[in-house]
Amino acid sequence: MTTRRELLAGAGLAALAAQLPVVALAQAKDSVTIAQTLEPPTLDPTSGAAQAIREVTLQNIFEGLVKIDRTGKLQPCLAESWQIADDNVTYRFKLRQGAKFHDGTPFTSEQVKFSFERAVAPDSTNAQRQLFTPIAEITTPDPATVVIKLKQPTANFLFGLAWGDAVIVAPATAANNKTEPVGTGPFKFVRWNRGDRLELARFDGYWGEKPALAKAIFRFMSDPQAQVAALRAGDVDAHTNLSAPEAVPQLKADPKLKVTIGGTEGETVLATNNAKPPFDNLKVRQAIAHALDRKTIALGVYGFDVNLIGSHFSPLHPAYVDLTGTYPYDPAKAKALLAEAGFPNGFNCTLKLPPPSYARRSGEIVAALLAQVGINAAIEPLEFPQWLERVFRNKDYDLSIIAHTEPLDIDIYARDGYYFQYKDPAFKELIGKIAVTLDETQRNELYKQAQRKLAQDAVNGFLFILPKITVANAALEGMWTDWPLPVTPLAELRWR
């Protein structure tokens, strides 16, 4: 007969045994679900300008010769080392041996040559084609060596190779990377359910350290309240940059979650079509600048202080100049400038806004501020593919609001055909000098001149630096607090 003591002991053992699988399961968790606001239009970072492409693919599916780490420093990647010759135009890269693409194709110097020549080809769709135009010649002495010779010294050439636009692709799979990407990164493509999620799996043939996670899912959630609900319910483990800043206090109070507020390189601007009347008139653009109360706009969007800007430059860079006082908030001055420009009663225009909440929310405030000086901006919401097609590519807009998240991208104002349509030979010459000035002190002085020129010309309405609001499960480690580049490297994530 079983005694009462034996029954109790058995029950205790059973209870303990019942708990053991739960503990083991928690320790063995090797998947993660991450939410982000925008869905990428394609999965090929060399095919378009959308930040969302790089968020999911860069340093996950695809890699470049070099990469930028979470502190903004340049690190080796597919190139384990490099040398720059005394002529400052010859770069010799020693490549990783043993690296391969997800389909088993060995990584060699030939794919580097193919990728960069493809990026600069006449039919290239690469959004940062200018990164490769300094290249005069690419040679491949052996499979593990690439020698790149530039036309002239180029100060930020290596830095540009860390961007998503400079990832290495293979000739056999490049054409299909938009929907079935094949790279050399620590994670490989599994499936993409458009409008919902992207699934990735750990690539066991990866050349580097084995990631802790075996599986990762990116979920695309544009609705701010849905983001908050999913985080609180545990339906997602993290969000890369929350669109509901008003929920930060509530989320910070939840012991299951960790909230950090960091910085990005995202200059948020009231983008202006400088070639379209009346915005081709400097006085009109100056009037708009005086009508914008940056602090009110930023507080209205976030509810807390963020970095305000007066030109297209990050406060994190040593060459930054605070130019927020160039055109202080002054509605009376704005009205006077409009009258001088021939618009004493103001005018009507459109304000086309992409989906991110910072754009939609700031758009409403900007429209109200412009209305106070007589500029009636009709808001037109666009989905992001529409915004890319109509505003970015076809320049079919008056005003828009967008954050430009690429680092050190002041040169976009010197590009022919860029959607701001700002054409100034003096500014273009200045950017040309910056590109070939290798001395950092001298280069920073030129950057300061460039910032002042853009501010004085009121090219855009310069608003604020986009903050990064990261919310994650308290047990998930490795999410980036800051975004020196908009990426979410899955190989750095692990559960504790």
Image: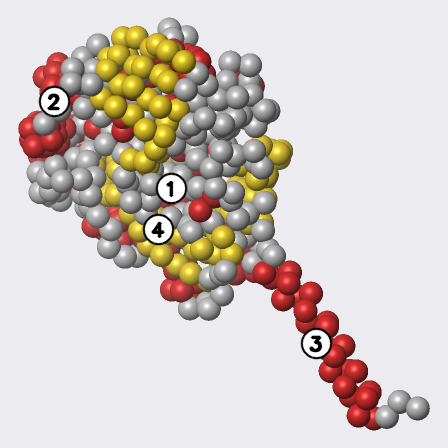
Amino acid type at image mark 4: Thr
In the rendered structure, which disc, 1 or 2, sits on the residue that comes first in sequence?
A: 1
Q: Which residue is mark 4?
A: 481
Q: Are marks 4 and 1 in contact (CB under 8 Å)?
A: no
Q: Which residue appears at 78% of the width and 88% of the height?
A: 8
Q: Image point 19% across, 36% down: which residue?
A: 313
The local crowd at label 1, few if under 14, some if 14 to 19, many if 20 or more residues have their Cα within 10 Å, is many
Q: Depth-wise, is mark 4 or mark 3 nearer the camera?
A: 3
Q: Are marks 4 and 3 in contact (CB under 8 Å)?
A: no
Specify the label residue 16 is tagged with.
Answer: 3
Q: How far apart in space, not on screen, are marks 4 and 3 (Cα)? A: 39 Å
Q: Earlier in the sequence, mark 4 or mark 1?
A: 1
Q: Amino acid at mark 1?
A: Arg
- Please indicate whether residue 86 sits to the left or right of residue 261 in the image: left
The answer to whether residue 105 is visible is yes
Q: Amino acid at mark 3?
A: Leu
- Residue at mark 1 to residue at mark 2: CA–CA distance: 39 Å
> Mark 3 or 2 closer to N-term?
3
State if disc 2 and disc 4 touch (CB < 8 Å).
no
Considering only vertical position in the picture, is 470 above or below 188?
below
Residue on which disc 2 sits: 437
Q: Nearer the viewer, mark 4 or mark 2?
A: 2
Q: Amino acid at mark 2?
A: Thr
Secondary structure category for the residue under label 4? loop
Disc 3 or 1, which lies upstream in sequence? 3
Q: Earlier in the sequence, mark 4 or mark 3?
A: 3
Label 2 secondary element = loop
* Whether residue 423 can be seen here: no
Element under label 1?
helix
Residue linked to disc 1: 360
